[in-house]
Image (cartoon, rainbow, N blue to C red):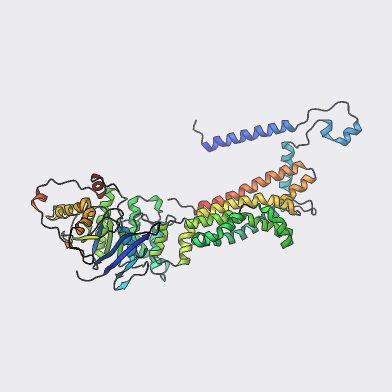
């Protein structure tokens, strides 16, 4: 009776998934053929009218669609028909560029705010006002000034992922234990060395938490941003397939977005574990 | 008193309070000690002992006066003055070796990796932590952590060691062992030590001189007790020395009563020169000391509780 918790949890997860798939199948399956219909009308209306089948695809439609995409992730049949891999590649590239720029900006400014009470007070009103602005509200301004839709999307990613990293870095740096700083002071450690050997490792877990929040937000925002700017990317793919009324593809994309988001989060969780120290 | 290796000259420390008032922790404090001396400071919580130590360490600056160490007035922290913190203050993301090596490489910046490790290894072995080099502080017991703190302080070969109640967080057995080792190492290296303690027995066992501080605010150095015990002392027979209980009773009397009433003594006309606090040797065991049954050694906390002064 001593099966491991992980094993039992996996059994429950699979059971829940099976129940979900069965309910989905029942919910979207047809109700049998409708009698007495003009064959010409039936031919034009398709299965939705003739068998009462829902327009919503069933789990097996989606499953086969996912399989189809997995088999050919990188095909390119022109602007409106690219493989999911290509679309995801565009989205990931935008997210990573915007995120890295945000990282390069947030960490030094976070250090400054965390180390200087003056700068903390001075910059606080700007941060408090800028932080709650929806990143998409910047989009028109970005499009107008940058005049490039792809770079505007990157800017939106930058502006949404900078705040959690900035605030967490400042908090982590400001709450480095006084005694550790005193150790550095009694050892006459220079300011630069102190920043890298005491403050950075001490604040690293907090900074990584901010980075993890940021990547999550960036991945949320990129879908919406690409719906607006269009052209390429997973967000554009979703909107394009909605316009094509291909619900199967929309569901496929939703699933893939979830998986990639999880992978990004797990990568940062791995990094966070590396820098976390037990006390 | 001989050479003035460390000379505290008229220091004061004041903190501004709300409403424009100023709180004086102490003022006009004078004290000096010779090279190689082991000095313990005893006083109640809040008397400014730690402030004095922080000023000596350079982590805090006096509002008035100066501290001169080795003929130079101190300006901030220095590698010549190593601090052993009460909370050990190890860097939790570094191993034992990493913590000690960090200090060594701060001291000798030009040293290569191998040389730094060699020096660190020497002091890790000195405090009896050989084999635990790759452990992180979280894996160590309280006593082992404090050993790392001691190894880190010693490894930079400082002129002075400053210890802020280094053993107060340890259990009695570990505390005893570490006292023995600190004493052995300091004697062997001729280390000058300034140590704050709460423990009368610790002070008697370790110190050459014991500084008694009155209660704050406005704390004073009431007396400097010269320890009559011989330099060669052993934990197991230190209490058999004829002067042991005289010293002990003197210190406890001070903590229980006189630390509080000393200001009244001065007001009542007792001559007191803050520049030269009286030095005394409580050596002659009077008949009372001999006849009175030997009391169990109370810590200051216990004494404070008994006298209704819970800090």
At horizontal 23% and vertical 47% (from top left) the residue drawn is: B303
For the question of whether residue B191 can be seen, the reply is: no
Image location of residue B257, percent across then percent down? 21, 51
> Which of the 4 image quadrants contains residue B106?
bottom left
At horizontal 17% and vertical 54% (from top left) the residue drawn is: B250
B221 relative to A123 in the view: left or right: left
- Above or below residue B172? Residue A3 is above
Along the viewing direction, whichever of A196 and A123 lies nearer the viewer: A123
Image location of residue B63, percent across then percent down? 35, 65
- Classify the position of the N terminus of chain B by image quarter: bottom left
For the question of whether residue A237 can be seen, the reply is: yes
Image location of residue A7, percent across then percent down? 55, 36
> Which of the 4 image quadrants contains residue A166?
bottom right
A53 relative to A2 in the view: left or right: right
B140 relative to A226 in the view: left or right: left
Query: Which residue appears farthest toward the left when viewing the image?
Result: B287
Along the viewing direction, whichever of A38 and A127 lies nearer the viewer: A127
At horizontal 88% and vertical 26% (from top left) the residue drawn is: A36
Image location of residue A41, percent across then percent down? 90, 33
Q: How many marks?
A: 0
At horizontal 51% and vertical 34% (from top left) the residue drawn is: A3
Query: Which residue appears farthest toward the top when viewing the image?
Result: A35
């Amino acid at each position: 009776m001593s099966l491991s918790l992980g094993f039992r949890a996996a059994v429950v997860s699979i059971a829940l998934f099976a129940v979900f798939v069965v309910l989905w199948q029942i919910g979207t399956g047809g109700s049998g053929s409708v009698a007495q219909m003009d064959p010409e009308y039936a031919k034009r209306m398709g299965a939705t009218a003739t068998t009462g089948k829902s327009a919503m695809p069933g789990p097996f439609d989606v499953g086969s669609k996912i399989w189809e995409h997995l088999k050919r992730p990188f095909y390119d049949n022109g602007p409106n028909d690219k493989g999911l891999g290509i679309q995801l590649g565009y989205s990931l590239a935008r997210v990573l560029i915007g995120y890295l720029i945000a990282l390069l900006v947030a960490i030094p400014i976070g250090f400054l705010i965390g180390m200087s009470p003056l700068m903390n007070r001075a910059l606080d009103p700007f941060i408090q006002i800028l932080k709650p602005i929806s990143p998409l509200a910047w989009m028109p301004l970005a499009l107008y000034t940058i005049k490039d839709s792809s770079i505007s999307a990157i800017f939106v990613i930058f502006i949404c992922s900078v705040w959690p990293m900035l605030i967490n870095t400042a908090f982590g740096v400001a709450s480095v234990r006084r005694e550790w700083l005193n150790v550095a002071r009694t050892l006459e450690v220079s300011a630069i060395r102190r920043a890298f050997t005491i403050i950075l490792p001490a604040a690293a877990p907090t900074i990584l938490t901010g980075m993890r929040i940021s990547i999550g937000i960036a991945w949320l925002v990129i879908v919406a941003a690409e719906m607006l700017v269009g052209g390429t990317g997973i967000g554009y793919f979703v909107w394009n397939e909605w316009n094509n009324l291909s619900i199967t593809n929309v569901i496929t994309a939703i699933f893939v977005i979830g998986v990639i988001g999880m992978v990004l989060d797990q990568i940062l969780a791995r990094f966070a574990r590396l820098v976390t120290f037990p006390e | 008193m001989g050479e003035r290796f460390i000379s505290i000259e008229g220091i004061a420390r004041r903190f501004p309070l709300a409403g424009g008032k100023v709180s004086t922790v102490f003022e006009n404090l004078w004290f000096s000690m010779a090279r190689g001396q082991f000095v313990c400071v005893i006083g109640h919580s809040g008397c400014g002992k730690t402030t004095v130590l922080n000023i000596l360490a350079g982590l805090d600056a006096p509002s008035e006066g100066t501290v001169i160490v080795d003929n130079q007035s101190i300006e901030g922290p220095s590698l010549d003055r190593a601090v052993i913190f009460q909370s050990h203050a190890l860097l939790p993301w570094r191993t034992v070796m990493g913590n000690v090596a960090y200090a060594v490489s701060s001291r000798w910046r030009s040293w290569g990796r191998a040389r730094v490790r060699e020096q660190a290894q020497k002091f890790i072995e000195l405090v009896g932590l050989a084999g635990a080099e790759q452990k992180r502080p979280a894996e160590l017991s309280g006593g082992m952590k404090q050993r790392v703190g001691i190894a880190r302080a010693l490894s930079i070969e400082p002129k002075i060691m400053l210890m802020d109640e280094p053993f107060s967080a340890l259990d009695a057995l570990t505390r005893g062992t570490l006292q023995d080792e600190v004493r052995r190492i300091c004697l062997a290296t001729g280390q000058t030590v300034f140590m704050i303690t709460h423990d009368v027995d610790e002070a008697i066992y370790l110190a050459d001189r014991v500084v008694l501080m009155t209660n704050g605010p406005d704390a004073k150095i009431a007396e400097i007790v010269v320890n009559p015990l011989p330099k060669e002392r052993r934990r197991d027979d230190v209490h058999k020395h004829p002067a042991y209980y005289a010293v002990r009773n003197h210190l406890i009397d001070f903590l229980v009563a006189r630390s509080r009433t000393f200001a009244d003594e001065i007001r009542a006309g007792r001559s007191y020169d803050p520049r030269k606090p009286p030095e005394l040797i409580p050596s002659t065991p009077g008949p009372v000391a001999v006849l009175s049954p030997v009391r169990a050694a109370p810590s200051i906390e216990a004494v404070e509780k008994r006298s209704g002064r819970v800090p």
